[in-house]
Amino acid sequence: MPQPPLDGLIDDLYYLEGAPPYARLTLPPAPSALLIVNLGAPFRIRAGTDLQTAEYADGCVVTMRTRALEFGYPLRTRSVGVHVKPWGLAPFLPMPAAELCDRPVTVEQVWGRPAIAELRDRLATAPGPHEMLTLLEEELMRRLSETAGLGLIRHMSSVLAATNGAAMIGDLSVAAGVSSTHLAKRFKELIGVTPKRLARTYRLTAAVFAIDPAAPVDWGDLASGAGYFDQAHFGHEFRAFTGLTPTRYLEARRRFLREHPGHTLDGWPLPTD
């Protein structure tokens, strides 16, 4: 668990090494962001079918996204990373989060070449994973900056998370004493998406995590339990976010479970091969 005040911005730090379960993995949208410092061979990311696959040698920064990312891994991968809350990257970015929405960038583009080169050298020569994660946490603490409006956005996002996206955005803005326009602008600046989009993502994520791929799924019950008007609405939303129908998604999850039982990446990531 990260130390305060980082614990209000990030969920965890992790170390990843070895052979990925598949050469390519799809990461559907979720209410989260990601920072990876790469220490192995470059990996590749495609953000949406209309964008070219790009190579990332030093790592990547991924703000809150609205569509799936496709990660292409080398035969063996090695990296340290941070799973970040939707608003958590804002204090570390020199630009509005909206500029990076669905467009991952290298760490160099955010922190500069000398800084990431030095950090990668220090991480690569650290004695072990624990020391590497400590180094990364210290770097984040050093780079932490004051961010105007972050308290408001963090509070409102936390309410949306606690209600799985069911809280009324208009009620939240009234309670905070700000206009809906101001709220949407702040959300775009600090998270990269509007409050409505974040609420939709929380709702879909709650529905996805309610799926047990090892058991039969009643899609109607799942849709109503997640607050969707009907199963058709749920199916449309699911395809809009993931590019898959719910049944295709379930097939991919079951394939992952069957071929790699108990793998640490089971959950959101899906095989794309």
Image (cartoon, helix red, strand yellow):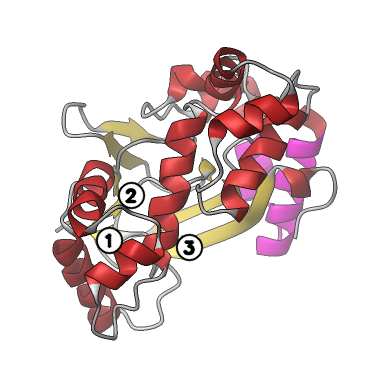
Residue 210 spot, x, y in % from top left: 40, 70
Q: Nearer the viewer, mark 2 or mark 3?
A: 2
In the image, which disc is placed on residue 270?
1
Which residue type does callout 2 highlight?
Pro
- Mark 2 in CB contact with mark 1 (< 8 angstroms): yes
269 sits left or right of 127 in the view: left
Asked if one can make out residue 19 in the rendered structure from this viewpoint, the answer is no
Which residue type does callout 3 highlight?
Glu
Q: Residues within 10 Å of mark 1 (few under 14, many from 20)?
A: many
162 sits left or right of 254 in the view: right
Residue at mark 2 to residue at mark 1: CA–CA distance: 8 Å
Residue 43 spot, x, y in % from top left: 34, 43
| Front-lying residue, 210 or 12 | 210
Mark 3 or mark 1: name the one nearer the start of the chain.
3
The chief SS type of the magenta part is helix
* Residue name at image x 32 percent, y 68 percent: 222
| Front-lying residue, 27 or 234 | 234
Q: Which residues are magenta?
A: 118-141
The quarter of the displayed image where residue 102 is located: top left
* Residue name at image x 40 percent, y 76 percent: 263
Which residue type does callout 1 highlight?
Leu
Q: Is residue 204 above or below residue 58?
A: below
Quadrant into which the N terminus falls: bottom right
Residue at mark 3 to residue at mark 1: CA–CA distance: 18 Å
Q: Secondary structure at mark 2?
A: loop
